[in-house]
Amino acid sequence: MASAAADPPPLAFTSAAPDVIAERYTWDEGAHLYLDLGINVIAGKDPFEIRATRKSYADPIDAQQYVVKNGKRKAVSLPAGMVTDWYGLKDFTTVSITNEAGTEVANYQTDFCPNSYNSARTRRDAPAETPYPQGCNGGNPFTLGAVWGIQAGWNGEVDSMPRRQELDLPDGKYKATVTLNQRYRDYFKIAADDSAITVGVTVTTAERDKRGAAVAEARIKAARAGEDTSEQAAVAEHGEHAGQGDPKLQISAYKPGFRPPAKAPKAVKASSIAKGPRPDLRSLPAWGISLSQEDEKWFVNFGATVWNAGTSPLLVDGFRRTGTELMDAYQYFFDAKGKEVGSVEAGTMEWDAREGHRHWHFTDFAQYNLLGSDQKLAVRSGKEAFCLANTDAVDYTIPSAKWRPDNTDLSSSCGQNTAVAVREVLDIGNGDTYTQERPGQSFEITDLPNGTYYIEVKANPADKLTELSTANNTALREIRLGGTPDARTLEVPSVHGLD
């Protein structure tokens, strides 16, 4: 057994390479630098874990670190100000970049999300797998709980880029010094000599190609929004889901848990299945609300999230009616040990052949309406069918939440037109977000009078899905339309200070 003196430090602040190349992308809007300095935090003999939660939207986020002392695991509250949103530890490092003449050309703070997409074990005796999520998923303003962590002996990548700030440097050679900020050095007991790293940087403009331009554009949008800027995240958007069911990307469809049965089950009633774990679909208030104009028509665009706060995943299998583009859908149920115990009819799935879709939609998941001030229907969204995917971590602190879901965009579920069966899943703690920005899905308000309206997000609208409760299926978000026919205006009151 190794002695205590030989144990690695609880947290180590390290670099992967003395020098890096930073690619600079140019396009019509200008230029943007993508910089990865290779700075990491490595967990010691115990995992580094933080759980952040809030009781309600009106309450602040409370973050606790889980530590092991005297062989026992306990929660210790982090000092105020370290966690203020869902992107991780705030102002974790300071990055200073100087040119060859020694002149500082950039200076900024970066946050730290322990849930790295490229996390891996850094020593041979580290555990083979990590339980922690990928990414901090801070983009949804109505998140309720998050889990961030680094497995023992694994790394967490430290942000190299500023959040919500542009960064561009001309081609040339630079030095970047990354310093762990004082409050974190003191709290995590990292020596000053081990808390500053200098890396050589060579900036070079990348050749323009179709994929590179697309990734660069996605990264720039992510940086402006303060979201993850990794290539994986850049090519896997939320909302109306990226990709179009490319069979080469149907990763989870080949995993045993994502293979539908060979044939449709016999129909039974939900009441005939013993009481046990059930999903619980809950709607979040609409968010990311904006106004747009197209062909002299005005539209209200919005994002809508329905999440599963239950005790079981929502699992729906579709079985194709031979020779048609329609499937019969069944919801499956499980006991407390995860064993399948039965299924019931749950509506249908239909093939959507439109550009940007080209996958199977479950038709009875949610409905979006624009209500008048009297809360009567004014406009119904054309978005009435869905490919289920775990796009947002809404609350990973609830019991049995799945921190690393397999199907996170339609490239990992939803199927091809050649499919005879499809499985779609919404896991515990996860939400499915759709952005309504296309005519026919967003609300057309061209001829609506000015006034107060409500965006209604309604889960399980026809009650075809069996869940723990239907009392929390609907959420309303107030909006106010104004202006003139040629210049409409939109006001969106906050919800407990959240936009």
Image (cartoon, grey):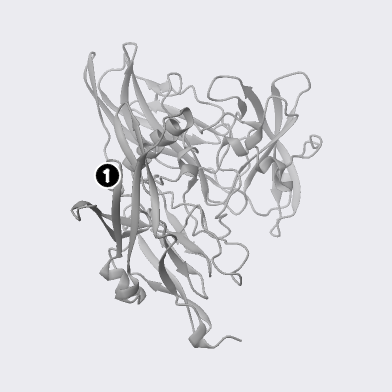
Q: Is residue 284 visible?
A: yes
Towards the viewer: 83 or 478: 83
Query: Is 354 positioned to the left or the right of 285 in the image?
Result: right
Residue 49 position, x and y percent, is: 47, 67
Q: Is residue 181 above or below residue 269?
A: below
**Image position of 353 (left or right of 100):** right
Snapshot quadrant of residue 467: top right
Please name the residue shown 57% across and 54% down the image: 402
Count of number-bearing discs: 1
Q: Which residue is at the front of the view, 310 or 151? A: 151
Horizontal side of 130 relative to 272 (left or right) equals left
Instruction: Give the vertical position of 232 relative to 292 (above or below).
Output: below
Spot the residue most to the top: 295
At 64% from the left and 23% from the top, the residue drawn is 351
| Quadrant location, the C terminus | top left
Residue type, mark 1 in image: Gln
* Residue carrying label 1: 165
| Displayed quadrant of residue 354 | top right
Query: Tag 1's secondary structure?
Result: loop
The percent position of residue 442, horizontal first and vertical second, equals: 41, 24
Residue 258 at what x, y percent from top left?
Answer: 70, 43
- Could you say which quadrant of the image residue 329 lies in? top right
Query: Residue at 46% of width from left, 67% of height from top?
Result: 42
Counting from the top left corner in percent of width and height, residue 498 is at 30, 46
Quick check: can you spot residue 373? no
Crowding at mark 1 (Cα within 10 Å: few <14, some 14-19, many 20+)? few
Task: Report whether 466 appears left or right of 27.
Answer: right
Q: Quadrant of the N terminus?
A: bottom right
Q: Residue at x 52, y 48 (%)?
A: 430
Q: Nearer the viewer, residue 255 or 44?
A: 44
